[in-house]
Image: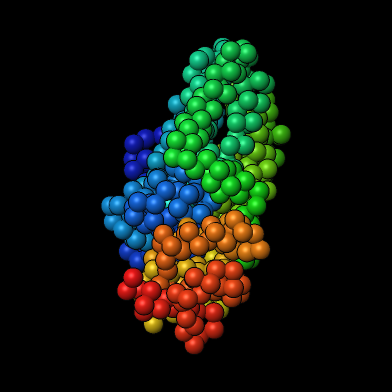
Amino acid sequence: MLSFFRINATLQIVGLLALLVLIRLPFLLSPPPLLVPELNWMLVGEQMNNGNLLYRDIWDSISPLSAVVYWLIDLTVGRSHLAYHVAGTALAAFQVFYFNWVMNVRDIYPDRNWIPGLLYALFLNMSFDCSTLSPVLLSTTFLLLAFGTLVKQMDRRGATDEVFEVGFYISLAALFYLPSALFIIWALVSLLLYTGASFRQHSLLIFGFSFPILLTVLYFYLADSLDDFNRNLLASVFRVRQYDLTDFQTLLASMFLPFAMGILGLLSLFRQTTRYVNFQQRCQQIMMIWGLTAVVSVALMPFLAPMLFISFVPALAFFAAYYFQGIRRELMAELIFLGVFGFTLFILYQGALALIPRWEPGRLSALQVKPSPIDTRIQQQKILVIGEDISAYRNNQVATPYLNWDLAKYDLRNLDSYESVISVYDHFRKDPPTYIIDKENVVKKLFQRAPALAASYEPTGQNGIYRRREAALSN
């Protein structure tokens, strides 16, 4: 397979994109298990489509541009799991093509070929959750555009005013996935060390980064929801931690080989420094800084899953390509690649299709939406789930802004505060749920603090589930 992609021709481009589609074809014919984050994104899009404003009427930590994308999907096709995988595959195809195009057109490697794109496509399939349209996948698209523009600056004698674009792309990446804002440090350090950019050009970079963010802040200021924006997005990056969604077995199984190949490729560079021209060495160094920046971003992840490590893929594919191209025996390179390819696809399909029953690595069991006890009795109703497990929303709609439990605690865990009780009461009055599913035992205290709410709801006989009274429903 490697020998086929060593040639730089149109057939190789078609073959690479066809390979990506073939790998994901089972998911396009029958989507894999629905994941909790995917359900959350669908609910955000649905709520925005119902006229609710993000952060003020929807308490969630999703970044604004990602929410806009999910709103557009809901506006177009509603809650469609398939749409997320189709869009994710289309975006992955663009990333694969653009990444390899930059490598070839800028002569970043000694030889032009499509091996970097092949490895990029493979590492994007290290787990089945990477195939969906995640905020990190959306964000990485713009980080790649920033990389392409930055490399173009390095290919010249000095930086130009196009550095504005680098900052602009990183800003858009941050508005899709907030931890990507760290990559502005990557851009600043790279410009400082490798381009000879002037103070004015560094200022342009910062302005390009600040401009979309300031426009976003202005939008929420004019909507009188700046405090909600700050609490639910900016502050949440340090506060929202959904540890129950972390699956360390799958994380280790799916990421071991991509990281191993990337590290081996990086180490191989130290033995071949004389083979590369100065420009290529500078590209290698800025990609090292990219990798270090991605490592720092791990501390800001709300949970740990392969999909959140997609920002590592450009660096891993970049260095792994050096490893495979540096193996002198083509047969040995082919065998090693086929081993990596086979194991990666095994983990991918094990997770989505359960090839080996009861074997957990790859399954992302903690991340999957589980059957809810209310599924057979409560459907197509407006409900409020108080707790981290949002599986009950799979066949129901969200009532009140309290979608994310880590953010809802701001009110629902603070019921000794008069302001919090008034806030909860107002949200219930504006958008009353037909059912309340209380998994955190806060409803009894809420009803004590707000008797008017207590008069509107009654226990159902099932522990922790309350139903709105018929009299309240008729009002």
The one nearer the camera, 291 or 226, is 226
Residue at 51%, 30% (x, y): give it: 214
* Quadrant of the image containing the C terminus: bottom left
Residue 140, x across and y down, in percent? 50, 41
The one nearer the camera, 211 or 316, is 211
Q: What colour scheme governs how the chains and residues are painted in the rendered image of this protein? A: rainbow
Residue at 54%, 18% (x, y): give it: 204
Instruction: Tell me: residue 333, above or below residue 169.
Output: below
Residue 434 in sight from this viewpoint: yes
Tell me the quarter of the picture where residue 240 sits.
Answer: bottom right
Residue at 48%, 49% (x, y): give it: 56
Residue 365, x across and y down, in percent? 55, 70
Instruction: Tell me: residue 34, above or below residue 108.
Output: below
Residue at 57%, 40% (x, y): give it: 180
The one nearer the camera, 132 or 174, is 174
Give the number of callouts.
0
Residue 164, x across and y down, in percent? 50, 21
